[in-house]
Amino acid sequence: APEVPLNARKKLLEIGKQHKLFCAASFTSEEIPQVLEEGILAYVDLLAINIDEAATIAGTSYEGAGVSGLIQEALQILQNHNKNIMVSITAGKQGSCCWDGVSLSTFPSVDTLVASTAGAGDAFFAGLLCGKALGLSLAESQQLATLIAGMSVQPPHTINKDMDCASLLKFMRSSGLKFSEKIIKLLED
């Protein structure tokens, strides 16, 4: 997490890779140049970033580049640093995309009332990690992450303490979006 100094996160990632653990990370736009320069991405299995951080990687501004081209450029640069890296890129109301090493999946955001976006990226990242821990594909984990992030923006606090499987299932059913059968079953059980 970006709240932890970069050198400490680098060391944790190195140790994680030494022990053959699944290593996930997120970096701020300000940290990206150092991350690229120091080869930190070599220790990352899953990188979770937002569109502004992707623009920093691509060396362009989000406003100046088309989203699709920006994402493709960022993915190419990331793969030059780690050919096996999986990547998640969130873009707020525009949804998200995930690269699993083979294909790019996109998923829209859930249209909901937003009280505060504080913590939405962390909630999305947590959803991705939960999905992967449950054995879901990255694309399926992206759908779970979308639900969790969508519910996380409803209260004015950074954590939605009313979130559970039942509330996520209700939120999913009211979203109008098509979710994987695995996500539906996960929330129904």
Image (cartoon, grey):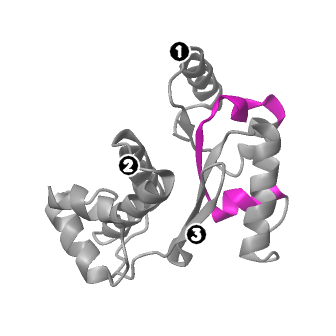
Task: Determine whether the residue tagged by mark 3 lies in a helix, strand or loop.
Answer: loop
Could you say which is closer to the camera, residue 122 or residue 77? 77
Q: From the viewer's perspective, is residue 43 above or below residue 20?
A: below
Which residue matches tag 3?
91
Front of the two marks 2 and 3: 2
Hey, what amino acid is under mark 2?
A: Gly
Where does the image place residue 30, in percent across and percent down from the top left? 72, 48
31 drawn magenta: no
Hey, what amino acid is under mark 1?
A: His
- Along the horizontal axis of the image, is 135 left or right of 96? left
Could you say which is closer to the camera, residue 113 or residue 138? 138
Which residue matches tag 2?
131
Q: Which mark is residue 19?
A: 1
Could you say which is closer to the camera, residue 181 or residue 36? 181
Front of the two marks 1 and 3: 1
Label 2, label 1: how far apart the Cα atoms are: 22 Å
Where on the picture, by quarter, is residue 50? bottom right
